[in-house]
Amino acid sequence: MNLDDDGSGADTAITRNTFAVGYQVLNDCYSSAAAGFSIEENVVFGDDATGDCISGSIAADPQFEDVAGGDYRPNNAAVAGHGAYP
């Protein structure tokens, strides 16, 4: 995600999702944290779960059921409570 414009993401909380990323979840928060933007309690796979505006997130492999078939249910118990597939 990029929040390059001043005030981007104001009053937005991204919570309890699973991100499979190739680089990083968020480049920089800039002024957005002061405007109420946060990324909290998510699972990040493929990079670490740290950075500006990121808190309470974990880095873990969700062990998706069948990516090729479009089935993104996690098989990892630590991840199962996050996202659309509890």
Image: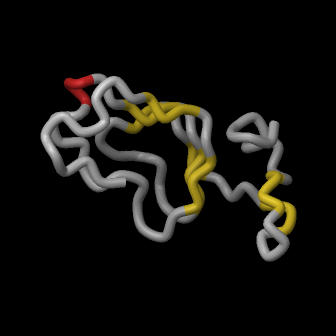
Residue at 73% x, 44% y is 79
Q: Position of residue 31 (x, y in %)?
A: 16, 35
Q: If the image is split into quadrants, where does the N terminus sit?
A: bottom left
Observer-nearest of 67 and 45:
67
In the displayed structure, 75 sits above or below 9; it is below
Observer-nearest of 10 and 27:
10
**Residue 71 placement: quadrant:** bottom right
| Count of number-bearing discs | 0
* Identity of the residue furthest to the bottom in this view: 68
**Residue 30 placement: quadrant:** top left
Q: Position of residue 36 (x, y in %)?
A: 30, 23
Residue at 29% x, 55% y is 27
In the displayed structure, 85 sits above or below 47; it is above
In the displayed structure, 58 sits above or below 67; it is above
Q: Position of residue 8 (x, y in %)?
A: 24, 39
| Colour scheme of the picture | secondary structure
Q: Position of residue 5 (x, y in %)?
A: 16, 46
Instruction: Tell me: 29 left or right of 69.
Output: left
Q: If the image is split into quadrants, where does the C terminus sit?
A: top right
Instruction: Tell me: 80 left or right of 15.
Output: right
**Residue 25 placement: quadrant:** bottom left
Residue at 85% x, 68% y is 66
Residue at 25% x, 42% y is 29
